[in-house]
Amino acid sequence: MNSTFLASEELQYLTTFATSLAIGLLIGLERERRPAAKAGLRTFALVALFGTLAAMLSQKTHSPWLLFGGLLLVGVMTIAAYLREQREHDELADPGTTTVVAILMCYGLGALVWHEESTLAVMLAIVTTILLYFKAELHGLTHNLDRRDLISMLQFAVLTFVILPVLPNNNYGPYEALNPYQIWLMIVLISGISLTGYIALRFTGQRHGAVLLGVFGGLVSSTATTMVFTRRSGDNPDLTKLAVVVILLANLTVLVRLAVISAVISPVILATLLPILSVGLMLGLIAAVFWWRDLTRQENVLIPETKNPAELTTAAGFGILYAVVLLLSAWLSDIAGSGGLYIVAIISGLTDVDAITVSSLRLLDLGKLQTAEAVTAITLAIISNIIFKLGLIFMIGSSLLAKRAAFGMIMTAVGLGGALILFGNEVIDHAI
């Protein structure tokens, strides 16, 4: 009985050390292919095993200093080896800081495995290896970032990690519709999605053509993208084909964007909202693909100049608009029923679809809206927004652009409206 237990325990130890060995070999394999790295496959494997052994002895002897002492020993020995190599060969050589940190990380992962966090240790080992392997790509990324990009990221960090945590998570105001934390959380969500498109657009806009320009432009601002390319096609008729594809894709990206936002805020609405968005997306894609195939060559175009979506004034502006729409929706729904909400959706949707979408989803979570009402409001807002942008194209764009863009945008709007009518009874039954 005792021998069986001991054999089982020893087998468990063997599995633990085998996991540590695999982690060390994984990271060491990447370092082995670097000629400048003085530590390779064997060193990293041994360090990972040593980390597990030190953690084991530390736990068995109830002495945490063994674990910390092992970390200190590994660090000192690694740094000393690099300093000696540097003195003997080239005083200007790379001191190997990355490899030193990787060795210390490997030791820590070995200790983590002993404390029954093998899954986390393996995940961190994979991330570490990726960071080490893609050195050139990461350096290129940092060199391509300019001051404006860094400011955008820092401002988003302020929105997310400085302002959001200090806001109260309580309901205030009429109908208890205003929750400072929830309002700012929506700002963070919209800013985060927009910032992703904003950065991606700056990196890929001129190099990868109409498709990515349309997708990333839609993530940042479909209205701004529509305006920019409408004006550019007016100045240069040769860009009309490209402008049509970019504008259509930017507006179709809004549908995907709203589906993602809905999934994050109120996943229960997806079962009824997604079929409607899908019909509009498919019909719009037919037109976009048709004109994309007509686009025979890649044009050299400028990236649309859009405002940083994480800028504090931009975020605050959206927050105020969202709060106003939230109040109006709750008030008009109370005094005029669903008709009042739909009026707000049509009016606010002219310039901004996000505000009415997140406010409808918020009211749905609070139990102040039915699913059918929220879905209808969001759909009407999207159709209203499409009509508004189509009007802009007719006003400031060429007649050729207007005719071609109208084909795809009207198909999208008809698809949304038709799907809402077609699935109307199912939406209502689902809400009930």
Image (spheres, helix red, strand yellow):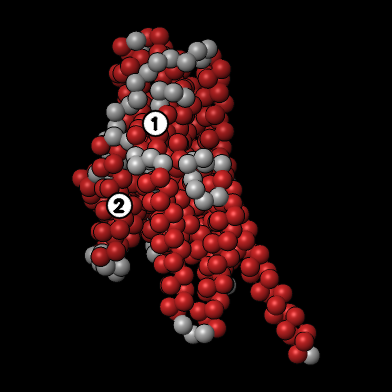
- Left or right of 244 in this view: 281: right
Q: Dividing the picture into quarters, in which one does residue 397 lie? A: top left
Type of the residue with mark 2:
Ala
Up-down: is 254 above or below 157?
above
Kindly give the residue lying farthest to the left in the view shown. Answer: 313
User: Residue 40 at x, y = what percent?
Assistant: 55, 50
Q: Can see residue 321?
A: no
User: Residue 422 at x, y = what percent?
Assistant: 58, 42
| Mark positioned earlier in the residue sequence (2 or 1) | 2
Q: Residue at x 32, y 23 (%)?
A: 228
The quarter of the rendered structure image containing the C terminus is bottom right
SS for dot 1: helix
Q: Residue at x 72, y 74 (%)?
A: 11
- Left or right of 140 in this view: 17: right
- The residue at which mark 1 appears reads as 203
Viewer-closest of 9 and 192: 9
- The residue at which mark 2 appears reads as 157
